[in-house]
Amino acid sequence: MNAVPAVGLGLVGCGLWGEKLLRDALHLGARVWVVDPSEEARARALRIGAEGVYRSSRELPEVDGMVVATPASTHYRVISELLDRRVPIFTEKPFTLALHEAQDLVRQAGERIFVLHVWRYHPGVVALKELMQGGGLGTPNLLRTFRTNWTSPRSDCDPVWTLLPHDLSIFLELTGTLPPVGFARAELSAGRAVGMLVLLDGAFPCIAEISTRYADKRREIRVHGSEGVAELTSAGNHVLFHRGSAASEQPRTQRIDLGEQTALQREILAVLHYLRGGPAPTSGADDALLIATRMHEARELAGMGAR
């Protein structure tokens, strides 16, 4: 793993995911200053190695870029408060909880906005993309994802907001496009959305199933083609490529190992290289707005409210 010259990051939010971002950014050579209203979170950030901790982003020193890892319901407000810094802003998904808020931020900040869709950097997604582009799968005819577990630690929004953006970003990464949502049906429990089945029907169907009513945690991506099927399962450390057409009696299975570097490490490296003059990370303003638009369409078709 190649670290980059020291970059200064401001991290707003040091909760469950923010702590992971902090640890990996420090491991990769960045200097990080943390903002969090929680005294406990600030103390934890200092123990991990933050350069400094603050209650408000207004107290931060000058940095090369800002990372937002606060609850989804605060993204619009937090990002808006950071715009005057005139540095790139990398926010965790979902971008915002309202399409008009996403549109407003892109209008104001343009190319300085990025959404951290970590699955676009997953080594398994990279391997699947290479199989699709290399032609080994033949003509793609189905892309299917499963994202299930029991309940959700997020209390400020329903789990559709936190789960579905992952799968939309995977569809975008693997196909290069994100056609309009053709079907969306919410799964309800006690009147609250706990999952969704979504279909995007472009050159071939892309289907996502998400739910927080499964006892087993499942993360699966399947790409079906005329000459084989490739799958990334919850194990996460390899892709299985089953070669064979629909007429084959049995496939010939190849295992593709993925190595040790995590998706989060790859994503943070992309951010740090960009801040040192390298190419832009994925999910810039255009992609961020496209995914936000498809989220809006899915929720509208499913008859769901904002939160």
Image (cartoon, helix red, strand yellow):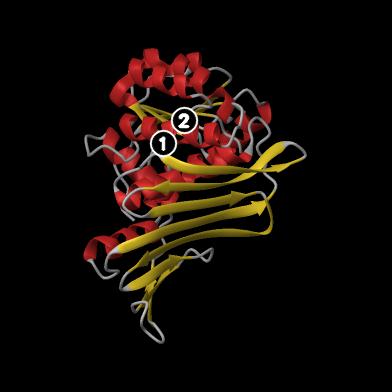
Q: Mark 1 points at which residue?
A: 291
Could you say whether the residue bearing mark 1 is in a helix, strand or loop?
A: helix
Q: Residues within 10 Å of mark 2 (few under 14, many from 20)?
A: many
Indicate the position of residue 241 as horizontal and vertical percent values: 37, 73
Mark 2 or 1 closer to N-term?
A: 2
Q: Which mark, by number, is residue 95?
A: 2
Indicate the position of residue 119 as horizontal and vertical percent values: 43, 49
Q: Amino acid under label 2?
A: Phe
Vertical placement of residue 265 versus 291, above or below: below
Residue sitting nearer the eye, 25 or 252: 252
Vertical placement of residue 132 versus 203, above or below: below
Q: Amino acid under label 1?
A: Ile
Residue lying at 47% horizontally and 45% vertically, measured from the top left:
166
Residues at circles 2 and 1 in contact by the CB criterion of under 8 Å: yes
Distance, label 2 to label 1, CA atoms, is 9 Å
Indicate the position of residue 124 as horizontal and vertical percent values: 40, 61
Can residue 1 be seen here? The reply is: yes
Query: Can you tell which of label 2 and label 1 is closer to the viewer?
Result: 1
Residue sitting nearer the eye, 271 or 136: 136
Residue sitting nearer the eye, 9 or 67: 67
